[in-house]
Every structure is written in structure tokens, then in C-alpha cells.
DNA sequence: CCGATGACCATTT
DNA sequence: AAAATGGCCATCG
């Protein structure tokens, strides 16, 4: 039914746009939400392709353990951390502190 | 058109 | 415990 999406990459972007300020989610969580648990890699690829797009808060996507693995794809390698800190998070050694507290899991938050 | 190339993660060896 | 592996899609040259 609702085939309002053309491809997986676009689906990823749609989910990322829903991440609230001050929260983060993971590549794996997005992949699972899209029914493709084994495609967490592709989530990263999608964001890489989307970095040019605006209105996609790509900085709110980190890896499983909270590492800012995508930081080198921003204008400068510190921008991802700065954006997250500006939203109230604490980053130490490229890792989000107390990630569980801020984790926004679409599988839970968007459950319909 | 075809192949190389990328922000991951769970499982197996 | 650390390293290798399998899974998966779109874009670019």
C-alpha cells in the first residue's frame, strides 16, 4: 500500500527528519524500523549521500555505542560534536555520554 | 553499463 | 577476546 517512498535511502532520510532536538538514534535502530535489520550500513550511506540536503539532522545519528562515526563527513570534523553539544548533549572522546538517556528509538517512539 | 565505493552491526571463527 | 565475515542499496566515473 502506501508506497510513498521511492527507495530505501529516502526512507532513511524521512526517519532522520523525525529525530527530536537533543536526542540521538543509531544506524541499526533506523534499519530495524524500516524492516531491514541487516542494512544498518546502508543507513550511513544514505546519510552520506544526503549530507548536501538541508533539513536532515544527520548529526543526531551515531553508532551503536554512541560514537560520532560520521563526523568526518561534515564541513569540519568537529561540527557534529558542536551541534550535539548545542542541543545539550555531552561528548567525550567522540562519544555521547549516557547515550541511553537520549536515545530516540523509532521502533519505540513511532510504534503504531 | 559495470564495478567500486561508502556514517554499521550481529554473528561466527 | 579479537578478528573476520555476511548482509544490503544508491550513486558516480
Image (cartoon, coloured by chain):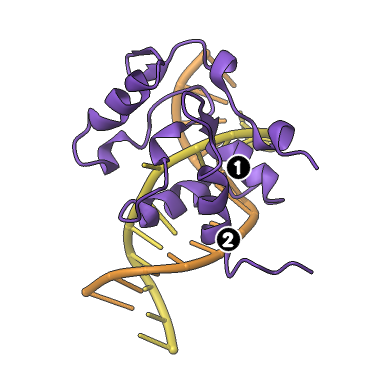
Chain colours: A purple, B yellow, C orange
Q: Position of residue A28 (x, y in %)?
A: 59, 38
Tell me how far mark 1 sits from mark 2, CA to CA.
Answer: 11 Å
In the shown orientation, is residue A52 left or right of residue B8?
Answer: left
Residue at point 52%, 59% (across, down): A9
Which residue in the structure is indicated by mark 1? A30
Instruction: Determine which quarter of the picture holds residue A75.
Output: top left
Q: Taking C1 as reference, is A87 above or below it?
A: below
Vertical comparison of C5 with A25: above or below: below
Q: Residue at x 54, y 31 (%)?
A: A25
Kindly identify which chain the residue marked by label 1 belongs to: A
Please check whether the numbered discs 1 and 2 fall on a single chain: yes
Quadrant in the rendering for residue B1: bottom left
Q: Chain of mark 2?
A: A
- Residue density around tag 1, few if under 14, some if 14–19, many if 20 or more, within 10 Å: many
Q: Nearer the viewer, residue A96 or B2?
A: A96
Q: Is residue A57 above or below residue B4?
A: above
Q: Tell me: A101 left or right of A21.
A: right
Give the label on residue A8, or none. Answer: 2
For numbered disc 2, what is the local secondary structure? helix
Residue A112 location (% of width, % of height): 80, 43
User: Is the N terminus of chain A in the top left, top right, bottom left or bottom right quadrant?
Assistant: bottom right
Foreground of the two, A29 or A57: A57
Q: In the figure, residue A90 lies in which quadrant?
A: top left
Could you say where residue A41 lies in the image, as x and y percent from the top left? 51, 47
Amino acid at each position: 500500500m502506501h508506497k510513498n517512498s521511492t527507495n530505501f535511502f529516502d526512507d532513511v532520510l524521512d526517519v532522520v527528519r523525525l529525530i527530536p532536538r537533543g536526542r540521538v538514534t543509531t544506524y541499526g535502530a533506523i534499519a530495524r524500523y524500516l524492516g531491514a535489520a541487516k542494512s544498518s550500513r546502508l543507513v550511513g550511506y544514505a546519510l552520506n549521500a544526503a549530507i548536501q540536503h538541508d533539513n536532515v539532522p544527520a548529526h543526531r545519528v551515531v553508532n551503536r555505542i554512541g560514537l560520532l562515526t560520521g563526523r568526518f563527513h561534515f564541513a569540519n570534523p568537529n561540527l557534529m560534536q558542536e551541534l550535539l553539544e548545542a542541543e545539550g548533549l555531552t561528548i567525550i572522546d567522540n562519544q555521547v555520554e549516557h547515550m541511553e538517556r537520549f536515545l530516540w528509538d523509532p521502533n519505540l517512539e513511532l510504534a503504531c
